[in-house]
Image (cartoon, helix red, strand yellow):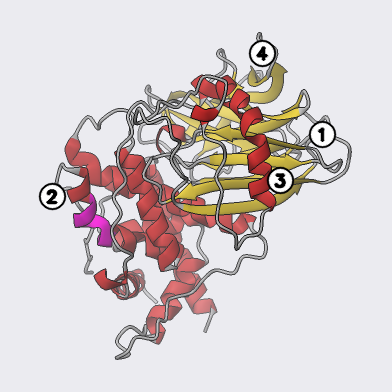
Amino acid sequence: MRLVGTLAGQDEAVPHDPVALFAAHRLSLVRLAVLLVDDLGTAEDVVQDAFAGFVGRSRPLDDPDRALAYLRTAVVNNARSALRRRRTARAYVVPRDVEPDGPDGRLILAEEHREVLAALDRLAPRQREVLVLRYWSGLSEAEIADALGISRGAVKSTASRALDALESIMEGSR
Amino acid sequence: MTATRTEDRLVAALQARAEQVRPEDLAPLVTPEPVRGRPRWGAYALAAAAIAAVVAAPFAVDAVRDPSAPEPGPAAPSASPVPSPVPSPSTDATPPAPKGRLHTVRGTADVDGDRQPDAVTMTYRTGREVPTFDLHVSVTLATGEQSTATADVSWVPSLEPARDIDGDGRDLLVVRAEGGDSDVPQLFAYRQGRLQHLATAYDSPPLTDGVDAEGRVLRWWFDAEGRMFSARSTQPLGQRTAVRVEVYRWTVRPAPGGGPVLGATRLAGTQCFDLVKDEAPHPC
């Protein structure tokens, strides 16, 4: 199995200057957010707000090398809040830019990918977060536990149940 | 379908979706400037409530204005006759114009217990150059009377369904601002003729979702009747997912200074809580 690992982060050279950090990792953070909230506009807001919170911390991080991990956690938390607000607004229709009409057509998702993403959308928020952090960000169980504030055991069981649920949803849709 | 096959499909789908977002798709980079000395909400709850009275009038206009009109902001604390709890980032006495995207969420609740729906509006701004979200919560009673309160949150707030935690017919407005050091519910009560942001009593346990400095898990929730509870594990979580917890019931009570605060009363015994299986603790 291949992991993308775009935001594994801990082994990357992380700039200590907040602006450089943001510029260097903004795209990856927005991509992480879009996998959690579905639309680009909300994803950009989520990341911008996460960075605003990071810059405005009342006390510096004990370990500057953990800045990226802090931002990742903030993005996940803000994405969860955004999803919660959607549930609160009854008439809200989730914006879909899953299939942007690119000029050369290369942006259109394959049917098999759309099926997986639709199933992912039906999972509980925590299950979706664990799967995205595991299978797109390429984080270890310990790193996911750190990002979500839960135990490694909870990560393991949540991931297992989420995969089972994903599989059931996709099988049931056929 | 095997688990490995599902995982491979998941990896491919996530990568394909992520790569749809290209650098040129992003809005121009805006980097917020740091602000030193951001106050904690609890420490300034009373001052914030005082400011609420000052900002109420302009906010009420903002809440009902034409959405297509330019966005006026609430009166700046520096222009008020009471001391501001927010340190000014500069010595310029001219209040800056509000920046960022204005978000408005509306709902209804019966905040005064007259069995008539009252209009609730929450506004906040994102994309600002300061790390707070300019949160305002206002209510317009069925009688037409308006009142506004503010709170300092450093994470994007969301308006939750209102709850009558005391069972006295008066709903409390509930705002979540999840993450970082503001991962606590922000509750607003209509008491003494105005909407007030509730601080927690000094002798109450932490009201948050997370883990405390000693590794004990913390949770808070509402039951089906709208009552509010929190729990704290008796032992550090460690690698376990099932723990025993102390459970607290939260109610609105008068503070020594006269205003309302949130206070907790511990329930007898302990309960069981599995972080993976349970939404809330339950009798063992």
Specify the amino acid type for callout 4. Answer: Ala
- Report if residue A152 is visible in the image: no
Nearer to us of marks 1 and 2 is 1
The magenta stretch spans residue B126: no
Image depth: mark 2 or mark 4 in front? 4
Q: Label 3 belongs to which residue?
A: B120
Judge if badges 1 and 2 mark residues of a common chain. no
Q: Amino acid at mark 2?
A: Asp
Which of the 4 quarters of the picture holds residue B252? top right
Labels 1 and 2 touching (C-beta < 8 A): no
Chain part drawn in magenta: A22-28
Amino acid at circle 3: Val
Chain to which the residue tagged by mark 1 belongs: B
Give the chain of mark 4: B
10 Å crowding of disc 2: few (<14), some (14-19), many (20+):
few
Decide which of A135, A105 is in the foreground and name it.
Answer: A105
Q: Chain of mark 3?
A: B
Give SS at disc 3: strand
Element type at marker 4? loop
- On the question of residue B125 being in view, the answer is yes
| CB-based contact (under 8 Å), mark 4 and mark 1 | no
Mark 1 crowd level (few <14, some 14–19, many ≥20, 10 Å Cα): many
